[in-house]
Image: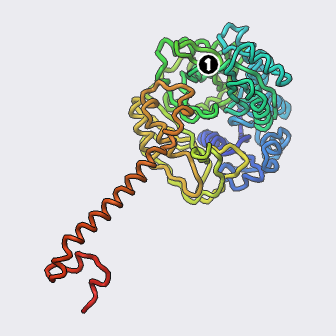
Amino acid sequence: MARIKKVLVANRGEIAIRVMRTCRELGLPTVAVFSEADRSALHTRFADEAYCVGPAPSRESYLVIDNIIDAARRSGADAIHPGYGFLSENPTFVRACEKAGLTFIGPPASAMDAMGDKVRARTNMMKAGVPVVPGTTAPFANVEEARTYAKSIGYPVMLKASGGGGGKGMRRVDREEDLDSAWRTARSEAMSAFNNDTVYMEKFLDQPHHIEIQVFADMHGNCIHLNERECSAQRRNQKVVEEAPSPIISVEMRKAMGEVAVKAAKAVGYVGAGTIEFLVDAKRNFYFLEMNTRLQVEHPVTEWTTGIDLVAWQIHVAQGGVLPFVRPVQPRGHAIEVRVYAEDPATNFMPSPGKIDSVRVPSGPYVRDDSGVYPGYTVPNVYDPMISKLSVWAPTRMEAILRMKRALSEYSLKGITTNLRYLEHIVSHPEFMKGDYDTGFLPREHQKLLGEKNEKLTKASLIAAAVYAHQRGEKQAASIAPAAAAGTVSTWRTGRPNSWKRS
């Protein structure tokens, strides 16, 4: 294949900038695309060129294939990197790129057909002998079909979007009477995020761990795994904190899961970076959950623990290059990532769009902040509220936790509400520090993580201190009043009004 000369990044925010940074290191010019709501976004300034692709709603801009292809044509870009979300797992987009003579930096459309659709992926994995979570092998035509199937496997169940991930179009349903509303919400979210409203159902496993394996394959039949990431700290099925390696995975289990992940990728002729996601039960049995046919949000923790630039590898493989090595890489040290959101955890995580007055980003040894904002930038209300990813590395897990706590204490974003303090409470929580936390950790400990009890105690302490100071002051004043009246104590000590005036 011909060498790539210019890359259009079909995304926005921090991931667009992250891809552009590697391109810049490789000497590749970059092209940004933006909606009308993102004219002042940082990624438009970071790129060498920028083109508007439509109005604010993503379905009228970032999800419009013809507009993206047209921007590539006008800019002279010969390759497109999709980032994650939007069109990153859309096989129609891949075929449109190929038709236009553009190199798509990602897997072939055939692999997306096989694994990008979650229902089809489950079927393919069952055929390949990979253990899967019990659930449907076809999307539902209507809610009545969903209700019938839920009764057959028993509640709780999970409704999940067939055409995407990232927590969008996912709903846990504990009772039959909640199914209708969950069905409508899941379909609506799926359509908005992926332009595909089909959903399927899985049995909900009690207190599972969410573990994913990073895989990488080239066009020459080579495929390896780059170890696991622990992604169990979630709220609303959206990952909030990730770490690598997982604190519950043994060397033997890593080897077994890695082999299954590679088998799954090879079964569909995968090329590029991908992630095989698993649920692990209390007995450490693991089940295939889905495959993300793209780069993951949490890829920095894998980069920290392997020393590999995954985006550079993506570009290398997209040009027909061979993987630099074909043996598993042992993880070195420990990395943790937290997702910083413009949202208020105390109000049910409501988004908090608005103007950022000031930003102070943490730094120091082994601290990385992938961000898409700057002082004066207005966070729009039409996209995902994640504004940055903070990650750290250290030789051991406990050192990584301490480094993350230090970094979060330095992080300051003024003008909007963020989840920064909530993240501090997560990494300081005994259950997280112990390492054996499951996907129910955040919902279960929500009130404690909000810090309400601590805040109440702080307020009570301040009130008590004020009362004590007042009472102490009254006693002190009473004790010195006779002496003051006799003229033996300076009136400055009594602090009484007008006591400093000349007589």
Among the 4 quarters of the image, the one containing residue 235: top right
Q: Return the residue at label 1.
A: 205
Give the left or right position of residue 280, taking residue 12 as reference. Answer: left
Residue drawn at (49%, 18%) of the image: 249
x, y percent for residue 411: 49, 49
- In depth, the one of 437 and 486 nearer the eye is 486
Residue located farthest toward the bottom when viewing the structure as drawn? 503
- In depth, the one of 378 and 424 nearer the eye is 424
x, y percent for residue 213: 58, 21
- In depth, the one of 249 and 296 nearer the eye is 249
Mark 1 residue type: Leu
Residue 256 in the image: above or below residue 184: above
Q: Mark yes or no: residue 185 visible.
A: yes
Residue drawn at (57%, 33%) of the image: 443
Give the left or right position of residue 336, taking residue 47 as reference. Answer: left
- Number of numbered discs: 1
Residue drawn at (79%, 20%) of the image: 147
Residue 352 in the image: above or below residue 11: below
x, y percent for residue 108: 76, 24
Residue 268 in the image: above or below residue 302: above
Helix or strand or loop: what does disc 1 sit on?
A: loop
Q: Mark yes or no: residue 324 visible.
A: no
Q: Residues within 10 Å of mark 1 (few under 14, many from 20)?
A: some
Among the 4 quarters of the image, the one containing residue 384: top right
x, y percent for residue 79: 74, 36
Among the 4 quarters of the image, the one containing residue 65: top right
Give the left or right position of residue 77, taking residue 212 as reference. Answer: right
For the C terminus, which image quadrant? bottom left
For the N terminus, which image quadrant? top right
